[in-house]
Every structure is written in structure tokens, then in C-alpha cells.
Image (spheres, rainbow, N blue to C red):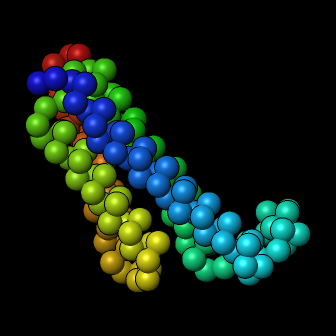
Amino acid sequence: MNQNLMILPVFAQVLLTLGVMSVMGARRRTALQTKATRMKDIALGQDAWPEDAMKAANNYKNLFEMPVLFFAACAFAMITKSVDVTLLALAFLFVAARIVHSTIHLGTNPVMPRAYAFFSSVLIVLAMWILIVVRVLSTGT
């Protein structure tokens, strides 16, 4: 299998991160323009943003937590030539779970559905890592 195909779910995750950053920026800009937040209230990093801007900021931060393990797994898979249909499918499933998580988080934000999406992504990235480790140790790559 073409190992370079793993770049596709990685790029999708990057696009998700940039998309959430754009939502966060737009919500913050709106808060400043409508005077829902004043510049002096946020100058020292205080969390004086309205709820919709805070949700976007929190989701943006989330995209630099668990996805770090995803990016590392994808890189290791490519380096060790472990990419196959199963690993590629898991990578796309991880991104799908993160998209669901972000959609929930940026929307009405019910905690339990968001938690299910989050823990799904955790289990998927764990499965990716287990598969990579087993393959590397069994082939000596």
C-alpha cells in the first residue's frame, strides 16, 4: 500500500484545526465589535469572552491535546511502513470522531455526547498505536 496516503487524514485533521481557529477568531471579533467584550478585559489573558467564543477557544485548545498522539502515530506508521487499509481507516475514523467532537463543542455542547466522541477518538488512537507497535516489533522494522 502507498504509505503516503496517510497524509490525507493528517491533512484533514490540520484543516479541522484551522477551521476551528477561524471560528474562534470570528467569534472573538464579533464579541469585540459588538462590545460584548472589551479589549482591556482580555489584555492580560482573562477569560472575559462570551460563551460562544469560549467554547471555540476551548475546542481549539483540545485540538492540540489528543491529536498530538494521532500525528505521532501517523508519522511513525509512515516511517515504519506500517500503513495499510486498517490503519488508514482508523486514521480517518479518528478525524471523524474529532469532527463530531468539535461540532458538538462549538454547537449546543451537551457534555455526554461530546464525551462519547472524545473517548471514541481516544480508543481509536490507542488502537492505532497498538497496531503500529505490534507490527514494528513483529517485523523488526
Position of 90 relative to 77 (above/below): below
- Relative horizontal placement of residue 81, taking residue 102 as reference (left or right): left
Q: Position of residue 111 (x, y in %)?
A: 42, 80
Residue at figure coordinates x 40%, y 35% from the top left: 72
Residue at figure coordinates x 36%, y 80% from the top left: 112
Work out which quarter of the rendered image holds the C terminus and state it. Answer: top left
**Residue placed most toward the observer, 53 or 126:** 53
Residue at figure coordinates x 62%, y 60% from the top left: 25
Quarter of the image where one finds residue 128: top left
Q: Position of residue 4 (x, y in %)?
A: 25, 25
Quarter of the image where one finds residue 79: top left
Position of 69 relative to 61 (above/below): above
Q: Position of residue 121 (x, y in %)?
A: 31, 57
**Residue 137 visible somewhere in the drawing:** no
Looking at the image, the residue that sits furthest to the top is 141
Work out which quarter of the rendered image holds the N terminus and state it. Answer: top left
Q: Position of residue 89 (x, y in %)?
A: 16, 45
**Residue 26 visible somewhere in the drawing:** yes
**Residue placed most toward the observer, 37 or 104:** 37
**Residue placed most toward the observer, 35 or 122:** 35
Residue at figure coordinates x 23%, y 48% from the top left: 92
